[in-house]
Amino acid sequence: MSKNRSDTQTVTRRFGGVPVSAVREYLVAAGGTPVENAAGEFSGDGWRASVATAEPRQVSGLEIEQVDFTISGEQEQVDELMKFLMPRIMRGGA
């Protein structure tokens, strides 16, 4: 059976208040491995992700770290990965 466009998904988000190093650790904990010769990229079973530090956001004189994050791959795997990552990312890297 061949894959069609409806079988794949790409999710792009920007998160604030979580260090890029924490997001990288979460991707490894989710079964991802760093992609050789591709800084900030990870691959897992049915998915590929990229993580990069974005321009910090200024809020009331404070600088909030921002992370750009993209996951693409098979829809079911991307959905499962997002379910794994979101509670961790939303708690600010704790």
Image (spheres, rainbow, N blue to C red):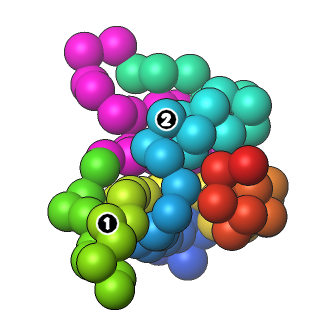
The numbered dot on residue 87 is: none
**Residue 8 seen by the camera:** yes
Residue 9 location, x and y as percent?
52, 69
User: Which residue is rendered at x = 20% and y = 62% of the image?
Assistant: 55
CA neighbours of label 2 inside 10 A, class few (<14), some (14 to 19), many (20+) = some
The type of residue carrying mark 2 is Ser
- Labels 1 & 2 near each other (Cβ < 8 A): no
In this picture, which residue range is highlighted in magenta? 36-52
Res 76 → quadrant: bottom right
Residue 63 location, x and y as percent?
31, 66
Q: Nearer the viewer, residue 77 or 64?
A: 64
The type of residue carrying mark 1 is Glu
Asked which secondary structure carries label 2, the reply is helix
Q: CA distance from mark 1 to mark 2?
A: 17 Å
Q: Which residue is mark 2?
A: 21
Q: Is residue 42 left or right of residue 75?
A: left
Q: Which residue is mark 1?
A: 63
Res 54 → quadrant: bottom left
Q: Nearer the viewer, residue 64 or 52?
A: 64
